[in-house]
Amino acid sequence: MLDKENLNENEQNEEVNVGEEVNTAKEEAVVEQSTEEIVDREEKVDHETDKPYKAGFFVRLVGNIMDQTIALAFAVILYFVFEKVLPLLGYEVIDKVGIFLIMYIVANVLCLTIIESTKLGTSVGKKILRIK
């Protein structure tokens, strides 16, 4: 008799364990599905925030000021290199402002052209502000 009772208890425990496994599997499936939905929503939000938008005048002005600041820094570097190399060739810079303006124009044309032709596809200021 004890053996029959033990067998019945074992069968009941196995049924409960099988039922728990089914419930656990269902809960895991629900968790996985809700996790996938959350990830999908986050990806949609990320893509929406990465999209460039049509900006107004002042936002574009700030972006252009950023780009001009980069070109100015590049022009300063070019000027100092030019000023150090020229005496080695036996020449001297007399009109420093004129040479700097020429370097600024060269830097402005080269910087923006090179930056826009890279993977960015746009200038640094426009990329930072996420505008077209």
Image (cartoon, helix red, strand yellow):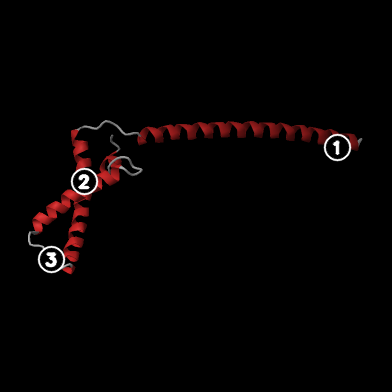
Where 113 sits versus 103, above or below?
A: above
The residue at 24%/45% (across/down) is 112
CA–CA distance between discs 2 and 1?
Answer: 90 Å
Locate residue 16, reporting x and y percent: 74, 33
Left or right of residue 81: residue 6: right
The residue at 69%/31% (across/down) is 22
User: In terms of depth relative to the viewer, which is nearer, 100 or 27?
Assistant: 100
Of the 4 image quadrants, the one containing the N terminus is top right
Question: If you read the primary sequence from the N terminus, does the residue marked by circle 3 or circle 1 appear first?
Answer: 1
Where 117 sits versus 86, above or below?
A: above
Locate residue 35, reporting x and y percent: 53, 35
The residue at 13%/66% (across/down) is 91
CA–CA distance between discs 3 and 2?
Answer: 26 Å
Residue matched to label 1: 6
* Mark 3 residue crowding within 10 angstroms, few (<14) / some (14–19) / many (20+): few
Identify the image quadrant of residue 52. top left
Locate residue 25, reporting x and y percent: 65, 33
Q: Which amino acid does label 1 sit on?
A: Asn
Residue matched to label 3: 91
CA–CA distance between discs 3 and 1?
Answer: 106 Å
| Secondary-structure class at tag 3 | loop
Residue matched to label 2: 109
Q: Give the farthest residue toward the right.
A: 1
Q: Which amino acid does label 2 sit on?
A: Val
User: In terms of depth relative to the viewer, which is nearer, 55 or 8?
Assistant: 55
Locate residue 44, reporting x and y percent: 43, 32
Question: If you read the primary sequence from the N terminus, does the residue marked by circle 3 or circle 2 appear first?
Answer: 3
Where 101 sits versus 24, above or below?
A: below
